[in-house]
Amino acid sequence: MAIANSISATEKTIFGHPAGLFVLFFTELWERFSYYGMRALFTIFLVAETTSQNPGFGWTNEDALWLYGWYTMLVYLACIPGGWIADNLLGQKKTVMLGGLLLCLGHGILALDGEISFYVGCAFIILGVGGLKPNISSMVGGLYPKGDRRRDLGFYIFYMGINLGAFFAPLLCGWIGETYNWHYGFGLAAVGMIIGQLTYYFGQPYLKKVGELKQQNAQQKKELRAQKLTPIEKDRVKVLLISFLMIIVFWGAFEQAGGLMNLYAKQKTDRMFMGWEIPASWFQALNAFFIVTLAVIVGGIWMKIKIKGKGASSVFKIAVGILIMGWGFMFMRFAASEYELLGYSSMHWLFLAYLFHTIGELCASPVSLSFITKLAPEKYAALMMGLYFAASGMGNMLAARIGVNAEAIGEKATFTGIFIFCTVFALLIIAVLKPINRLMHNAEETSN
């Protein structure tokens, strides 16, 4: 079975794009608003003292980071069964609808005050993201016929929706959660998800023939599975395995944002500005802000490099992303040094760290999914995409493990270690880039 990807030539358009794109744009915007709103509060809620005016669970940093690691890992791993259900049972469109309903339930349950309800809410969110996340992006591609030049711009528009939601979520949910009541913040995230779900539901007329389940000829399936990998395909799989290791390293460092760095902003950063204390969760909005403001610039730099005939492979871009993102942790090392001297650290270190992390993400993240679709053998396409999400999940768990160890060895040593490892790892990949590119057998050139 496969998903039908087609669009009627007479379908309504907005700004030259299928109207369905904007249905998916606003659905994903509100889904990301709910997810990042909850994420911004996750660890700082768990460690908030039970006797404070706005009580949390009173957990230690280590316990909060462990749960955060498990939660974010399972969110990614849930994308594997979510994709399978869409491919084999419901189709993408219905699976996204189911995922949205589960997310509404999950975020709504988090608004309740109780430890059991917190775990149950997280479980529903994990299942909901698993159904929605891997399938809604594929539906965007399904809006455009093969070879349609509008496709790349369509994904860019969709990507901006993700980051607009991620930008406003910490500002609104974080402010309400930290200032008034944690569960009011979680409740606002639930309201956002409900708006997204209603948008998707009433936008169904604009999503006809997109994301539907299509029966594949039984003989075609049999022939596809019987095919053996060619030597070229085997070489490309080797490159994919290397890229999965790079993905683990990237997210293992980058995802300190919602864990260790979020707690650092809350507990060790001087957040006073003109007599007002900035909520710690607001720093979670910096990544999305920098993405929106810098995406065109970073993309333009890579385009100029390509035009000059010095085309950079996706592996090189991911390696550069790891390198630049790793450099961002040097600013956090400076922050930790300042804290040791003064008992607090300045906000500008967090700004600089998130700036470098975002530039690194803009180099690495946008090319990852496309890279996998170009190299994966047809018969293992779904498996390789599943492994990508699994690698992302493992990276999130690695991030939690690093954060937990920071309590024992200190933030200064931790941030320094991340900087050194990312730099050495990225340079090692760049050093062996030529043999890696040979193993790809021009896959990126032939798929453009």
Image: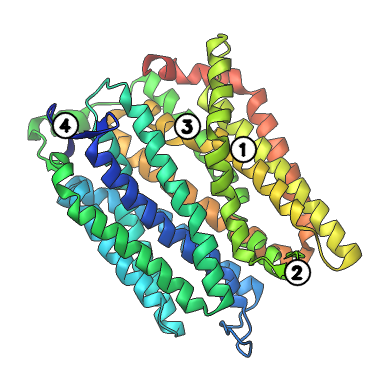
90 relative position to 447: left or right: left
**Label 4 or label 1, whichever comes before in sequence order:** 4
Instruction: Indicate which disc residue 111 carries.
Output: none
Q: Residue 178 location, x and y as percent?
A: 58, 74
Instruction: Indicate which disc residue 359 carries.
Output: 1
Category of crowding for the residue at label 1, using alpha-carbon neighbours closer than 10 angstroms: few (below 14), some (14–19), many (at least 20): many
**Label 4 or label 3, whichever comes before in sequence order:** 4
Q: Residue furthest front?
A: 274
- Residue ID for mark 3: 367
- Residue ID for mark 2: 275
Three-letter amino acid code at disc 3?
Answer: Val
State how far apart marks 4 and 2 are (Cα): 55 Å
Q: Residue furthest right?
A: 341
Q: Residue 190 location, x and y as percent?
A: 37, 68
State how far apart marks 4 and 3 are (Cα): 25 Å
Query: Which element is circle 1 on?
Result: helix
Three-letter amino acid code at disc 4?
Answer: Ile
Q: Are marks 4 and 2 in contact (CB under 8 Å)?
A: no
Category of crowding for the residue at label 2, using alpha-carbon neighbours closer than 10 angstroms: few (below 14), some (14–19), many (at least 20): few
Residue 23 lies, with reference to residue 339, above or below; the image says above
Q: Name the residue rendered at 39%, 37% in the picture.
A: 157
Q: Residue 205 location, x and y as percent?
A: 13, 46
What quarter of the picture does the C terminus occupy? top left
Query: Which element is circle 3 on?
Result: helix
